[in-house]
Amino acid sequence: MSKYKLIRAFALMWIIFAFSTPLNAAVVRTDFNGDRKADLFVGNIFSGQMFAWLSNGTTIASRPSYGTLPPNSGWATIGMKNANADGRTDLYWYNSNSGAIATQLVNGATVSPMVNYGSKLRSQGWAPIGLGDYNGDRRFDVFWFNIYSGSVEVWTVNGTTALQKLALGTLPPNQGWVPIGLRDLNFDGRTDVFLYNPYTGGTGAWLIGISTVVYGQVAPSQGWQPIALEDFNGDGKADLLWHNIRTGNISAWLINGGVVISSVALGILPPSSGWILAGLNDLNGDSKTDIFWYNVNSGGTGTWLIGNGTGFLPIGTLPAIAGWRPIGLDDFNGDHKADLIWVNAFTNATATWLLDGGKIIANVAYGPMKANSVWTINVQQR
């Protein structure tokens, strides 16, 4: 594979990864009704029916319909964030046929008609790479990347309108750089663009409104891959999590704006053990992102509480052979600690473990999704 094709393939992989990873949620919740408890967005793959499951922690209080989008329409969610700064999570949509971006504003049991912001054709190389707050107004804007030209753009929004369509810069494809993350790296309330070079292993960022910075380089041949941007030391600034796919080692670069202040080895779980890194969230309410582990063989779960010094803490087991799979971490009871949502692939049953760090304080059955069809549950992602 040529270098150029490698870069394009990597860029496409990250675009797909950003919108399909089920367990990269934050305690910043999917909250459709503003009660500060996580809700669920449930969709039917075949019929296009959509529902919100409004949770009050121990029960699903209601299941309002959010309408239907036919599967052949080309529309798919690319994120659930706040588009109008009203404290409620809204739906962001992308149409893979037309390249259009749209939102639906949510108010608990009701959802607005789709508001179309405009389009960029996929055939010309454009794809949305994520949502972030470019200008610090607490409304999430749409970031775009062109895999042919390397151009990066942002559309700022206010809920019903795309206010500005701004060119942020260009990453020449022959140099290898691609945008792989959107997070606030310097705690100024604005989303920055994290950059990675899969050919050289170089890392850097565009600090919005400030400068371009270079962090360092880790040769891909060593097995290390950047996998997430989260706050591991509680300073409000995103840090970079690395995973070695050969050895199972996990480490973090603690970042302060334009500088890596330290590199921290977090631990190791060998790939042969069956454990996979399955989620990132604050499980004990100390404002530091913790690491959630799942064993694909046994169905066991556990966590590393970052900065706690406790090592690996087992949480509990739901046998994988019985059909149970963890699909998301979010705060369902409003205690500022992430909880775990499960779905049973055989029965469509759903359940939540309400967690306090490494302890299960309650096992709550949310009830089944409708039988004889294929449903998905979307949980808030970074």
Image (cartoon, rainbow, N blue to C red):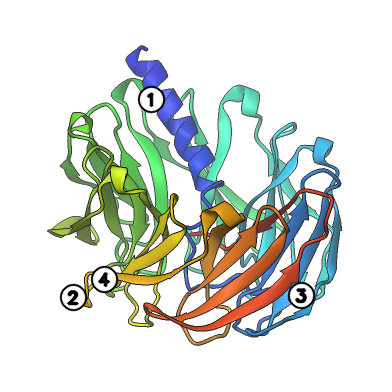
Label located before the other in sequence (3 or 1)? 1
Element on which disc 3 rests:
strand
- Residue 325 lies in quadrant: bottom right
Q: Which amino acid does label 3 sit on?
A: Asn
Front residue of this view, candidates 262 and 138: 262
Front residue of this view, candidates 195 and 73: 73
Label located before the other in sequence (3 or 4)? 3
Label located before the other in sequence (1 or 4)? 1
User: Is 295 on the left-hand or right-hand side of 42?
Assistant: left
Separation of residues labelled 3 and 4 (CA atoms): 35 Å
The residue under label 2 is 309
Front residue of this view, candidates 153 and 6: 6
Callout 1 touching callout 2 (CB < 8 Å): no
Relative image position of residue 242 (x, y in whole percent): 26, 49
The residue under label 3 is 107
Q: Which residue lies furthest to the top in this view?
A: 2
Q: What residue type is labelled 4?
A: Ile
Nearer the observer: mark 1 or 4; the answer is: 4
Front residue of this view, candidates 78 and 113: 78
In the rendering, which numbered label is found on residue 126?
none
Element on which disc 1 rests:
helix
Element on which disc 4 rests:
loop
Q: What residue type is labelled 1?
A: Ile
Nearer the observer: mark 2 or 3; the answer is: 2
Separation of residues labelled 1 and 2 (CA atoms): 39 Å
Q: Residue at x 35, y 78 (%)?
A: 287
Q: Which amino acid does label 2 sit on?
A: Gly
The residue under label 1 is 7
Label located before the other in sequence (2 or 3)? 3
In the rendering, which numbered label is found on residue 306?
4
Separation of residues labelled 1 and 4 (CA atoms): 33 Å
